[in-house]
Amino acid sequence: MVAWSEYKIMARERGALALELFVVESTPAKTADDVKASLPAHLAYQRELELSGILVLAGPLSDSTGENMVGSGLIILRAASMEEASVVVENDPMHLSGARSYTLRKWLVNEGSLSINIGLSTGKTVLA
């Protein structure tokens, strides 16, 4: 196993972006009604995170067939540290209420390309 900091250095040395983001998989921990009850506050919180530049992307996940929604979601955040990301995630109304639990991981973005910035809930676009 390679230490995170060492892997990040190796990625940069080979010319990769090595952008550190944080990925949250949020999964139902209570009933669908509990999740629905927290949804308006959750969406308002995500909008605040988006406007403040913390939220990169977020949305629901399907089951493995791609046909059914299972109540899980994926959230990608910008943060200075695992601890900072954890505070952001813990303060999500879905997690505060116990309607969902979560797994938080660091993600080192190395490959791909972006050419436009789109605020998904605001409709704001910025060409890069």
Image: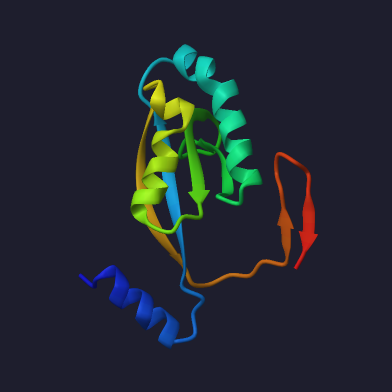
- Can residue 25 be seen here? The reply is no
Query: Which residue lies at the image location 20% right of the left edge and 70% below the top edge?
Result: 1
Q: Is residue 9 above or below residue 104?
A: below
Q: At which x and y percent is residue 126?
A: 78, 59
Pick the residue in front: 66 or 102.
Answer: 102
Pick the residue in front: 81 or 74.
Answer: 81
Pick the residue in front: 70 or 55.
Answer: 55
Pick the residue in front: 103 or 60.
Answer: 103
Query: Which residue lies at the image location 44% right of the left edge and 41% below the top edge?
Result: 88
- Can residue 94 be seen here? The reply is yes
Instruction: Give the quarter of the image for residue 66.
Output: top right
Q: Is residue 48 left or right of residue 77?
A: right
Q: Is residue 92 above or below residue 9?
A: above
Q: Is residue 88 above or below residue 98?
A: below
Q: At which x and y percent is residue 97?
A: 40, 20
Q: Is residue 25 left or right of residue 56?
A: left
